[in-house]
Image (cartoon, rainbow, N blue to C red):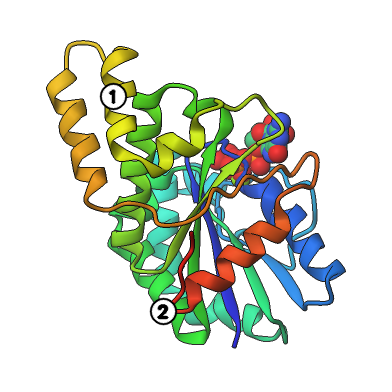
Amino acid sequence: MIFNVFFLGNAGCGKTRLAYAFNRWLRRKGFKSIVCNLDPAAEYFPYAPEFDIKKYVDARKLMIDEGLGPNGAILSSVDKMNKMFKVWFKDILEYDVDFRIFDTPGQLEILLYRNSAISFISKIGKSGRNVGVFLVEAKLVREPVSLTVLLMQANIAKVRLDMPTVLAISKSDLKLRRDLEMLLSDSEYLEKRVVEEGVGGHKSAAILLCRALAQMPWRQRLVKVSSLKETGFRSLYGIINEAMCVCGDLT
Ligand SMILES: Nc1nc2c(ncn2[C@@H]2O[C@H](COP(=O)(O)OP(=O)(O)OP(=O)(O)O)[C@@H](O)[C@H]2O)c(=O)[nH]1
Ligand SMILES: [Mg+2]
């Protein structure tokens, strides 16, 4: 069984670097693994991906050819990626692997709201088991309200992309809140912290978000990764495997 691992998350949360570092770790452990860049706007990689969508669809080129702005070009790219799916995916199928690591665009909303993106991700899923790793950046989870919003987004990703999805804290070499584990596992504690640490004028909306999250908890242990220090990869590998097992308890 081939695992299609999608690194998801907000702009700059560390997807590309983790794709590279985790791929190297998997290879060191004896797995056959490749990195596939699905970001049509990626300009720089810390590695040479085995597959780069820009060979077929290049957002920068579309900006010039079609007179589009940066986001319009990515939207148009994603539509083209879906239309040309069979053309580019055959390149990926040529690799005999255990893991395909997919690096995705920083414009997460394009993946989540554009049907063409959802469509090609679902087609990829026919070739193996799709699993999402939603990265939550260490810096952004220092404020409880920011963590709440990110957790909501991770739930939206799970629903929209329709695949087992796990959470991982990225850049965990940076300072983390000491109560992060409590914030993630205890929804009443999260709500209390959100209220006490200030949420501006929309306190009741923030509380409702916390209560909605309480109904869809992330039943998994805390996974912290750092691509810089190359730590947490065994734990990430473990939780990806468990996410695939329908009976898996991720706590
Ligand atoms: N401290 C620290 N910084 C990191 C880590 N991983 C990535 N970074 C830094 O975070 C920035 C963004 O990293 P990327 O891997 O390009 O993030 P991304 O999510 O692919 O970014 P986009 O594709 O633009 O959305 C870079 O400056 C990286 O050097 C990490 O584990 N620790
Ligand atoms: Mg990137």
- Residue 69 is at least partly visible in this image: no
- Residue 225 is at least partly visible in this image: yes
Secondary-structure class at tag 2: loop
Give the residue drawn at x 63%, y 58%: 236
- Position in image of residue 207 (x %, y %): 19, 28
- Position in image of residue 191 (x %, y %): 27, 29
In the rendered image, the vertical position of residue 135 relative to residue 163, given as above or below: above
**Gap between marks 2 and 1, in whole Å?**
32 Å
According to the picture, the residue beneath numbered tag 2 turns out to be 246
Ligand 1 is found in the corner quadrant, namely top right
Q: Amino acid at mark 1?
A: Lys
Q: Quadrant of residue 197?
A: top left
Q: Seen from this angle, which residue lies furthest left?
A: 204
Q: Quadrant of residue 90?
A: bottom right
Q: Quadrant of the N terminus?
A: bottom right
- Position in image of residue 61 (x %, y %): 56, 48
- Specify which label sits upstream in the sequence, 2 or 1: 1
Q: Which mark is residue 26?
A: none
| Left or right, residue 33 beside residue 155 | right
Q: Is mark 2 within 8 Å of ligand 1?
A: no
- Position in image of residue 198 (x %, y %): 30, 12
According to the picture, the residue beneath numbered tag 1 turns out to be 192
Disc number lying in front (2 or 1): 1
Give the residue drawn at x 25%, y 45%: 214
**Between 165 and 91, the one nearer to me in the picture:** 165
| Left or right, residue 171 beside residue 158 | right
**Between 215 and 146, the one nearer to me in the picture:** 215
Q: How many marks?
A: 2
Give the residue drawn at x 41%, y 79%: 246
